[in-house]
Image (cartoon, helix red, strand yellow):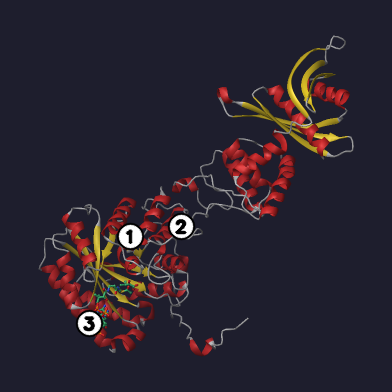
Amino acid sequence: MPRMTTDATQKYVPFKPVDLPNRQWPSAVITKPPVWCSVDLRDGNQALIEPMDGDRKTRMFKLLVEMGFKEIEVGFPAASDTDFGFVRQLIEEGMIPDDVTIQVLTQARAELIERTFESLKGAKRAIVHLYNSTSTLQRRVVFGQDEAGITEIAVKGARLVKQLADANPETHFIFEYSPESFTGTELEFARDICGAVAEVFQPTPDHKMIINLPATVEMSTANIYADQIEWCHRNFRFRDSIILSLHPHNDRGTGVAAAELGYMAGADRIEGTLFGNGERTGNVDLVTLALNLYTQGIDPELDFSDINRVRQTAEYCNQLPVHPRHPYGGDLVFTAFSGSHQDAIKKGFDALAASNSKVWEVPYLPIDPADLGRSYEAIIRINSQSGKGGIAYILKSDYGLDLPRMLQVEFSRVIQRIADETSKEIVPQLIWDTFQDEYVRRDSPIDFQEHSTIPDTRNPSMRVIEARIVENGQARTIEGHGNGPIAAYVDALARNCGVAITVQDYHQHAIGHGADARSVTYIEAQREDGKVIWGVGISPDIVAASLKAVTSAVNRALAA
Ligand SMILES: CC(=O)SCCNC(=O)CCNC(=O)[C@H](O)C(C)(C)COP(=O)(O)OP(=O)(O)OC[C@H]1O[C@@H](n2cnc3c(N)ncnc32)[C@H](O)[C@@H]1OP(=O)(O)O
Ligand SMILES: CC(C)C(=O)C(=O)O
């Protein structure tokens, strides 16, 4: 096995923690959702192999509006005719609801800012999002500028934005500034450059500006991002006139944690995308963030009641699949294959059904799939890792059979054998067919046909049974007596067919309702040698179901 030859200690520099001795965020509790801003149509779009065309953009925009987003970054109008044309289409075709504000991004370059404003002509409201990069690395290698030079780019850009906004009073403009690559920027410089831009925009508590602090590249653990945010929250000028916004990316795989801790640290707003599409490892995933809030009893004010449709639309627009294990939305996230999980889920559902509680408490299911429009159908699926609880769950939920515990144990061995032999998933239909072959359709060598009972004239507490059976292809009528039809039938089988069993246990319940209702009987029988064997019978007639169950046990006893 080859090893990484690079000495990491020489090649990578650890991120310096923030000196914030009095940090407050670890004790903060989230009680309300942030202001959400979707950047699917901009940051998400710019990371796609094929950026969205007009149709895909429209589909995504409509979905975001339907879900309840009130701020949507719809593009980088100066980047392409597609982006520009889409902004024009939204405005000219009146597609922007009154309570939704579109947002557009621009670099701090005059020609790009001018083109951006052109795209917004006629809009009722718009957020103009200006950015330039501020990190030590980008200052050095991309811009070749010191702090003053970088500040000058931002301030010049902001002045032009302000001037063009003032010249277009028919639109209510909100200003947003991002010190891009904020996570690699000294906090004092971030404070100063944001202060200089705010000085131009002159925000007030009634007309706030947005300052967005992006983890353009996620460079540290989430607690350090939270420290950075709390530091800015405490030290920024104009704080009461600023909406402090987060824009986490997910390079270290902790974008969601960073957003949650950053929000606890004093932010007001979060920019991200559905299912986390975006540059490299993506933007922060708003689906996960919002539903994390929901599972804490907080209304996220975004609608996920049909999460499959949200996912399908995102997949169509982005032309990228959502991972089957993606939190909340992935195909497999409400599915348990492993036995102990299935057993606990089944017991959790049973306990919930038996209680009056409204509180969702099912082991291994942190959210009720039904809240997301997901069905319970796929919660339990069977393979070689599964156990009796999962198999019993499928037979109950799909076929209405409530197997006694010891029968679950016996039948699970049959399914386990198939799973081991095939190494494949065992779908519900195969479980059902196997169950029927193993128990319900066991009509050889003895096939029960029909019966009648009459009181035993010699002993009024006993019954005599006459049962018509087919044994090894030969129709016969057999007779026996006992204290009820089951005992009498067992007696008849012992006398006439030479099979002696004793019935140890008996369970019966209905399947279905009304005219279609049938009865199912489970019989636990013991052979003369002590071996325990189960039999199952299903019939519209209660007694016939029991006699079929006895026949099933006898046939299985003879075969064993
Ligand atoms: C972190 C982010 O996601 S930021 C958003 C990034 N998104 C995109 O880049 C997608 C859309 N972009 C584009 O279509 C193009 O890059 C355009 C149209 C904006 C600009 O295109 P071009 O001018 O041809 O080229 P390019 O993007 O390479 O420009 C880089 C130049 O802009 C400068 N620049 C980059 N960002 C900024 C900024 N925010 N403000 C001012 N100048 C900037 C660079 O220093 C460089 O200057 P130089 O030419 O003097 O070296
Ligand atoms: C423009 C900014 C907000 C950005 O997309 C980023 O830093 O990731």
Disc 1 element: strand
Give the CA separation, mark 3 to mark 1.
28 Å
Query: Can residue 218 be spotted in the picture?
Result: yes
Which label's residue is closer to the chain start, 1 or 2?
Answer: 1
Give the residue at the far right of this rendering. 529
Q: Which one is nearer the viewer's eye here, 452 or 66?
A: 452
Q: Which one is nearer the viewer's eye here, 558 or 288?
A: 558
Give the CA separation, mark 2 to mark 3.
39 Å
Q: Quadrant location of the C terminus? A: top right
Disc 2 element: helix
In the image, residue 413 lies at what x, y percent?
A: 73, 47
Give the residue at x 33% y 63%.
Answer: 40
Work out whether 191 lies above or below 298. below
Q: Which residue is mark 3?
A: 153
Side (left or right) of 99 relative to 304: left
Q: Which residue is mark 1?
A: 35
Work out whether 493 lies above or below 56. above
State which image quarter holds ligand 2: bottom left
Give the residue at x 86% y 35%.
Answer: 527
